[in-house]
Image: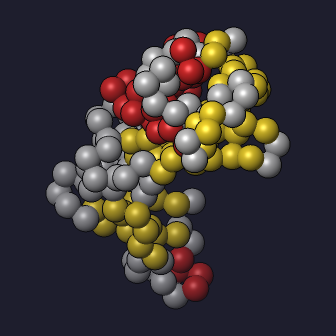
Amino acid sequence: MVRPTIPRAPETLSMSGASGVCVICIEGAQAIGMAGKSAYTRQVMYLNQIERSFSAAHALEIGGVREAIHGHNWSVSVIIAGPSLDTDGLLVDFHALERTLDAIIGRFHNQNLNTTAPFDRINPSAELVAQYIAVQIVPSLPNGVRVQSVSIGEAPGCTATYINPFEGAER
């Protein structure tokens, strides 16, 4: 059994404490002569991932040349991260996160991205779609939880990932 033993800061009384750092003691450590000693220290981090898909068309401008409009079955993978769990033992409610993502990508489903905001003003590349989704999710997250990454697949083997810069990227 793994349990927290020595909090990093007074307000950190459990693995879900404010500092996100805890010292772990393995019960039964007496058997290996480590009774009362810390086995290791680690940064506590929880990750949740959801996946969705939508169908949409787009036409990229590459090197000043606009390609022909074409469609994809886009796959979306969102990973969120946080140092602590809520009182229910959750980083976030998966269903709430799914509803948020569904609302964001629902506007794009069966549409031409080139005529759908904000991609009516910017190139609708997989990279920019991933970044847009990441930014849109942030307001729905609990305090201290952040979007770690959003990956967009246009076709098998063709995936673009936006990795959120962590400074100020959490809610």
> Which residue: 56% across, 72% down?
28
Instruction: Evaluate whether residue 129 shows in this view.
Output: no
Q: In this view, does 78 lie above or below 110?
A: below
Q: From this viewpoint, which residue is outermost toward the front?
A: 64
Query: In the image shown, does 25 or 80 lie closer to the viewer?
Result: 80
> Which residue: 45% across, 54% down?
45
Q: Where is residue 166 in the image (x, y as percent from the top left)?
A: 35, 52
> Which residue: 38% across, 24% down?
140
Residue 70 figure quarter: top right
Q: In this view, does 110 lie to the left or right of 30?
A: right
Q: From this viewpoint, which residue is outermost toward the bottom?
A: 33
Viewport quadrant of the C terminus = top left
Q: Where is residue 54 in the image (x, y as percent from the top left)?
A: 69, 21
Query: In the image shown, does 83 or 98 lie closer to the viewer?
Result: 98
Q: Where is residue 102 in the image (x, y as percent from the top left)?
A: 57, 17
Instruction: Evaluate whether residue 10 shows in this view.
Output: yes
Q: Where is residue 161 in the image (x, y as percent from the top left)?
A: 58, 48
Q: From this viewpoint, which residue is outermost toward the right?
A: 156
Q: In this view, does 70 lie above or below 7?
A: above
